[in-house]
Image (cartoon, grey):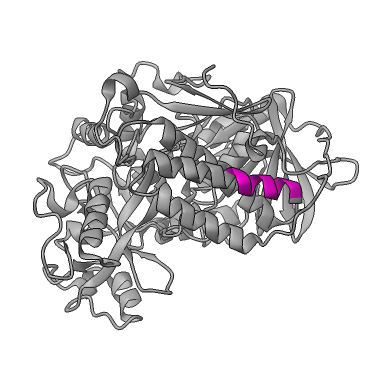
Amino acid sequence: MGDAPESAPLLAASHLGGFDPRRTPVLTTDVLVIGGGLAGASAALAAAGAGVSVLLLSKTPLTETNTAYAQGGIAAVLGPDDSDELHIADTLRVGSGLADPAVVRHFVAGGRDAVRRLESLGTRFDRSDGALMLGREGGHSVARVVHADGTRSGWVMQETLLRRLREHPAITLREGAFVRDLIRDGDRCVGAVALIDDQELAITAGAVVVATGGAGQIFRETTNPAGACADGLGLAYRAGAVLADLEFVQFHPTTLYIAGASRYLISEVVRGAGAVLRDRNGDPIMAGHPQGDLAPRDVVSRAILQRMVALGDTHVYLDMTPVRDPRAMFPEIARICAAFDIDIATQPIPVRPGAHYMIGGVVADVEGRTMVPGLYAVGECACTSFHGANRLASNSLLEAALAGERAGQVAAEDARTFGPRSLPPVPFTAPSSAPRIQLDDMLYSLKSLMWRHVGLLRTGAGLADARERIDLWGRYLVRAALPTRQSHELANMLTVAALIARAAGERTESRGTHYRVDHPQRDDAAWCRQILFRRGPDGVESWRGPLRVPSDRALEGIA
């Protein structure tokens, strides 16, 4: 299989706590969906539309998903100067040799249907004279991004989907429900254990769809909402699923930087409209690149960081004065900046990079199937090999809409075939000693460590230091075994952070979003392949791919 197992306690753990179905209340549903962004909501609506019952759990309010914070929109081939072949070529180029051409073709071909379906549900995309307005973002050859209410695209989609979820009689929604573990019976995933109002509740289901979003909160600087804590990756890893491409974390070049304030994403569409990145001296940062300010995100992010280091500054500036009437074109950005006394029509916006999108995740096919029967993964927490080593802007919502819908349909078939079953007990071993732990302090230390050593610029020494420290914190947390949402959430973050650091340490080259200062060149001969992880009997097992998931029916006939 590859490397010898790494036996850090969290990496070896199969559960974060025991479970006894005789003492814990159990709910029954045909399909359990964990997460309610575009991918999860699409799965829930599709499964319910197929005639089965659906329980959708979300640890945060359903208005606080990653989708709700998305600004750009959905990439789809709709313009007269565009084609599937051009969109495919852009995606493969940005994917840096690791995107699967058949998978890319599948999702690109579905773009028009995804937009039509969202409109049929009630999403009002921006139009001019009846035609959909198309924006251009980094890495795209032409304008092909469908947006809604300017830069509020994600919120408009989320609001629309939430209305449909709430009115569907076969769907039950439960917010404030944190899923701490999945449950397997033999090889099959059959349910989950959730914490709701600090009480445990078990759910038995014929199929489980994980759609929990990303992992941005592992890093100190991030555009992600507070709930993006790598929960789905941690859940699936402990359940025996395979994870891949974890070293590839996309950093967005432009987040509003005001010391002490929450970070706010400044959409790439702004640069597509003419905004220019400048340093404090007014010099343009991307003048030397052929694509200028619309170069791929990893290129722009590193250029910003290098300019910050060279000038000893904490940020750079986004100059919107070249944009015609920016306050009217981008009202939400204008409103946020005005709260900090910044007039975007006359004053530059202070920005810096932040962790934005988890490209790697749970290995799944285009219908969401993972290597664990009964378990599906869709959206940002999944790895379908659509994005490769770097994600083309606005391809994420395209993938979420299409994979989510199809996973819901297939999960419904699964549920009818296998049905909910009795949940087996999970043994729990009490810790031998429980050190006193300040979880907030450990979390801050983790976020700072990941930003420092596993961020935009990486070195072998820094990655080794990160792994050693994360392992130490994991040992403390396992011994404490605190039965709280905060400790379980932190355990997921430590688990996934350790795997990210390990993958980044193993990949001794620079490719896509992964940049090694000590290995700056791309090495196709050795590294045009994936690094895959699975929990083994004594810890994590890793090997080099590619790995094909159980079913590729949706790709039949696609070259």
Highlighted range, magenta: 471-479
Find the residue positioned furthest to the bottom. Answer: 341
Relative image position of residue 429 (x, y in whole percent): 83, 39
Q: Nearer the viewer, residue 165 or 309?
A: 309
The answer to whether any part of residue 504 appears in the image is: yes
Label the magenta part by its dominant secondary structure.
helix
Measuring 86% from the left and 40% from the top, which residue is drawn there? Answer: 21
Q: Quadrant of residue 12?
A: top right
Q: Nearer the viewer, residue 391 or 251?
A: 251
**473 displayed left or right of 261:** right
Relative image position of residue 553 (x, y in whole percent): 46, 19
Measuring 44% from the left and 42% from the top, which residue is drawn there? Answer: 463
Dividing the image into 4 quarters, which one contains the C terminus?
Answer: top left
Measuring 9% from the left and 50% from the top, which residue is drawn there? Answer: 288
Q: Is residue 369 magenta?
A: no
Q: Is residue 472 magenta?
A: yes
**492 displayed left or right of 151:** right
Q: Nearer the viewer, residue 294 or 7?
A: 7
Q: Is residue 15 above or below residue 173?
A: above
Number of on-image labels: 0
Q: Nearer the viewer, residue 507 or 228?
A: 507
Relative image position of residue 172 (x, y in whole percent): 67, 51
Q: Quadrant of residue 203?
A: top right
**41 displayed left or right of 170:** left
